[in-house]
């Protein structure tokens, strides 16, 4: 899986491409920890863009759950956007779409992101 | 009816080998691509369960995956030589739990049951056998 980061004001976009399975989950967990810890400044919002994510298993759901908990503790807004049907199905079946904010697309996610800290 | 079988040691490094085996079967049998995801997910969850929970320290059970296609369904059977364990005996996770209460145990097996039509466990000799079947739309 490829992970690309983009920063827009105080929002960090994490763009995923490929498969979030057992093989890629460990590395992604570490990357996401670094994003949430903030290199210099902690982001006000983290948006995981899943428009090119083809697959997620329970190993990936685990990383999302840990990240959403950490975000909550750190006061960071955390959301997913642009899920493909196969990924959406796994989120729905597992009940994760009830506990993680999911936006239809990136524009909606950005519009909902908090403006940032003063 | 088409049938294929693949064996690997219960080591996480072999997950891509099994995924590739499933994909090759899928394209050779010309099955609908949209339905592959359910089998890929079930294969990963079941195999990783054996790797993480069914392989006592210092042992590497053997895992065999077989695919068997009939006119309208595909059956995937995963057998392993590890200690007796019925993953279907795990309590299902509470999918309505709040963020703070949510636990991850049993989630993989729960997903397998959701995406497959039938799942059954049998202890056969010294092996665990998990059999999963799903209707394949033509």
Image (cartoon, coloured by chain):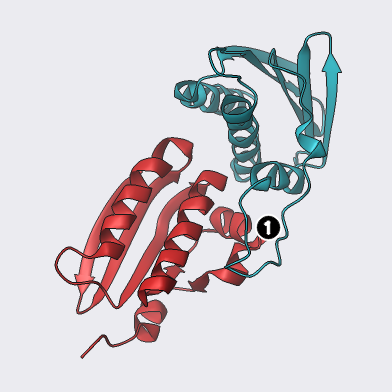
Chain colours: A red, B cyan
In the rendered image, residue A27, in percent from the top left (x then y), is placed at 34, 42
In the rendered image, residue B87, in percent from the top left (x then y), is placed at 75, 34
Instruction: Name the residue located 53 percent from the left edge and 28 percent from the top edge.
Output: B19
**Lateral position of residue A8 relative to residue B90, left or right:** left
Q: Which of the two residues, A5 or A25, is positioned nearer the viewer here?
A: A25
Q: Residue furthest bottom?
A: A118
In the rendered image, residue B29, in percent from the top left (x then y), is placed at 65, 25
Q: Label 1 is found on which chain of the structure?
A: A
Instruction: Name the residue located 73 percent from the left edge and 59 percent from the top edge.
Output: B94
In the rendered image, residue A64, in percent from the top left (x then y), is placed at 47, 58
- Residue A72, above or below A5: below
Taking the image as drawn, is residue A57 in sight? no
Q: Quadrant of residue B137?
A: top right
Q: Residue furthest front?
A: B57
Looking at the rendered image, the quarter that the N terminus of chain B falls into is: top right
Q: Secondary structure at mark 1?
A: helix
Q: Residue furthest top?
A: B125
Taking the image as drawn, is residue A45 in sight? yes
Mark 1 highlights which residue?
A93
Question: How many badges with numbers are in the image?
Answer: 1
Disc 1 crowd rating (10 Å Cα; few below 14, some 14-19, many 20+) is some
- Residue B64, above or below A108: above
Q: Quadrant of residue B5?
A: top right
Q: Which of the two residues, B15 or B72, is positioned nearer the viewer here?
A: B15
Looking at the rendered image, the quarter that the C terminus of chain B falls into is: top right
Instruction: Name the residue located 23 percent from the left edge and 71 percent from the top edge.
Output: A42
């Amino acid at each position: 899986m490829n992970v690309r980061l983009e920063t827009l004001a105080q929002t960090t976009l994490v763009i995923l491409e490929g498969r979030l399975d057992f093989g890629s989950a460990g590395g992604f967990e570490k990357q996401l920890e670094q994003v949430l810890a903030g290199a210099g400044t902690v982001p006000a919002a983290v948006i995981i863009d899943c428009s090119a994510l083809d697959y997620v298993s329970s190993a990936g759901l685990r990383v999302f759950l840990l990240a959403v908990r950490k975000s909550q503790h750190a006061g960071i807004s955390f959301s997913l956007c642009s899920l493909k049907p196969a990924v959406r199905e796994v989120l729905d079946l597992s009940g994760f779409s009830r506990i993680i904010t999911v936006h239809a697309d990136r524009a909606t996610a950005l519009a909902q992101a908090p403006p940032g800290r003063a | 009816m088409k049938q294929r079988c693949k064996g690997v040691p219960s080591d996480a490094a072999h997950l891509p080998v099994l995924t590739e085996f499933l994909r090759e079967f899928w394209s050779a049998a010309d099955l609908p691509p949209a339905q592959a995801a359910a089998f890929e997910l079930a294969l990963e969850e079941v195999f990783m369960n054996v790797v993480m929970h069914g392989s006592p320290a210092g042992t590497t059970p053997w895992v065999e995956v077989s695919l068997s296609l009939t006119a309208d369904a595909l059956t995937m059977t995963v057998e392993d030589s590890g200690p007796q364990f019925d993953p279907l005996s795990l309590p299902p996770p509470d999918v309505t739990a709040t963020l703070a209460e949510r636990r991850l145990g049993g989630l993989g097996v729960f997903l397998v049951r959701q995406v497959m039509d039938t799942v059954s466990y049998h202890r056969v000799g010294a092996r665990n056998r998990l059999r999963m079947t799903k209707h394949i739309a033509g």
